[in-house]
Amino acid sequence: MPKLLTVFVFLGLSACQPILQNDEVKGRIMGTTYTIKTQDFEIDQQQVDQRLNQINQIFSSWDQNSELSALNRQPVGESSNISNEMAFVLKESMRVHEQTNGFFSPTMGSLIDAWGFGSVNVEQKPNQVAIKQALAKSSIDRLALNGSRFEKSADIKINLSAIAKGYAVDEIAKILKDKSVKRFMVEVGGEIKTQGSWLIGIETPLGQASVAVELVDESIATSGNYRQFFVWQGDRYAHILDPHTGLPVSSDLFSASVIHKSNMLADAYATAMMAMGYAKAIKMAQELNLKTILVLNKCDDPCLSKNIIKIGL
C-alpha cells in the first residue's frame, strides 16, 4: 500500500556537530522521491540510482517485467527459484506477519488492486462480493517458501510496497557504510536511516508542533492516514486496509512511527500499527521492544490526556 510522507528532516545536522563539507542528491524511484545527504563525502548518484533501479526491478508491482510481477503471474502449483533478495524480504515479511497477528501481510495484492490503491485503475470501489473474492486470494497460508524455492497454492498476489522502500533505504545505507562514510542520511518516500546524529521531525495534526526525534545510527519509518485518503460510504478512510476484513481502516491513529536499526522492519511494523489502532499498537510495541511514537487522531480513553504516545523513548 502507498506510504505517506509523514517524516521529514526537521533540522539537518544536530548543532553540536562540526561544520564539514556537505553533499546532497535527490531523485525519483519506486513511485516516490529520495534524498541522500552526507558530510565530508561526495555521493556517487549513478551508483545510487543503479542500486535503486535494481531493487525496483525486483519488488515493483507497477513494472510488469519485475520479479514480483512474474511471481504474481506464476501458475498455481508451479515451483520456481527466486532471487536471494526476494527470498530475504519475503521471509522477513512472513515473520512480521506472524509477529503482528496478521496486521501486516505481503499477500494483499488482490485487495489493494480491488480498492484501486495499486497498479490497477478502478472506476468504483468494490462491493462486498468483490471484497470477499479478493480476500479469499489474500491468505499468506497459500504462499510456500523453502529457501529460494517459491510456490503458491492459490492465485495470490504479492504486494511488498509496505516493506520494499525500507529495504531500499537499508541497501543504500549499506553502500555508504561500505565506503566508511561517517555521517549520512538516506530518505526514500519518507523512510529515513542515519549514520551519526540527525534531528528528524514527525508531522502532527494542523496547528501542533512537529515531534522532534534525534536519530543516532538508527532508522525511522512512519505510516499515516491524513494525506492520502478517500471518502467511502460517507466516511473518510486512509489507503490502509485491514488484512483480516479486506476493508479500509478508520484508524484512531494520525500516524505511527517506529525507530529501529532496520528500516525495512520499521517500515513493516509502522504499517501494521496503523492497521491495528493505538491500543494494539502499544501492546505490540511493548512486546517487541519497539521504540515507537504514536500520534492519536481520535481517542475515547479518558486516561490519555495527550495525543502523542512515546514507547521505549
Image (tube, rainbow, N blue to C red):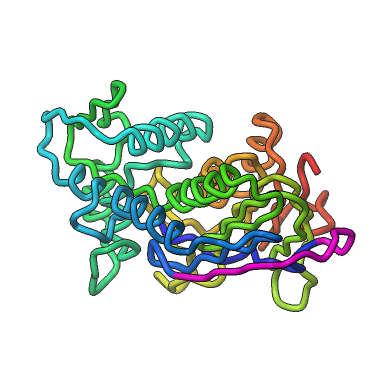
Say left or right for 109 vs 160: left
The image position of residue 250, as x and y in percent, is: 52, 59
Say left or right for 188 vs 260: left
The image position of residue 102, as x and y in percent, is: 45, 36
Say left or right for 98 vs 159: right
| Residue at the extreme right of the image, as rendered | 16
**Residue drawn 37% across and 50% down?**
55
**Residue drawn 21% across and 48% down?**
133
Which is more toward the observer, 29 or 3?
29
Which is more toward the observer, 236 or 149?
149
Q: Is residue 253 visible?
A: no
Q: Which quadrant is home to the C terminus?
A: top right
The image position of residue 295, as x and y in percent, is: 70, 58
Which is more toward the observer, 13 or 261?
13
Say left or right for 19 vs 55: right
Q: Is residue 21 visible?
A: yes
| Magenta stretch holds residue 165 | no
Which is more toward the observer, 221 or 28?
28
Vertical order, 242 against 48 (above or below): above
**Residue drawn 72% across and 67% down?**
21
| Residue at the extreme bottom of the image, as rendered | 207
Specify start and end residues of the magenta stretch as a single range: 14-27
The image position of residue 189, as x and y in percent, is: 51, 63
Q: Which quadrant is home to the N terminus?
A: bottom left
| Magenta stretch holds residue 19 | yes
**Residue drawn 54% across and 72% down?**
227
The total number of labels drawn is 0
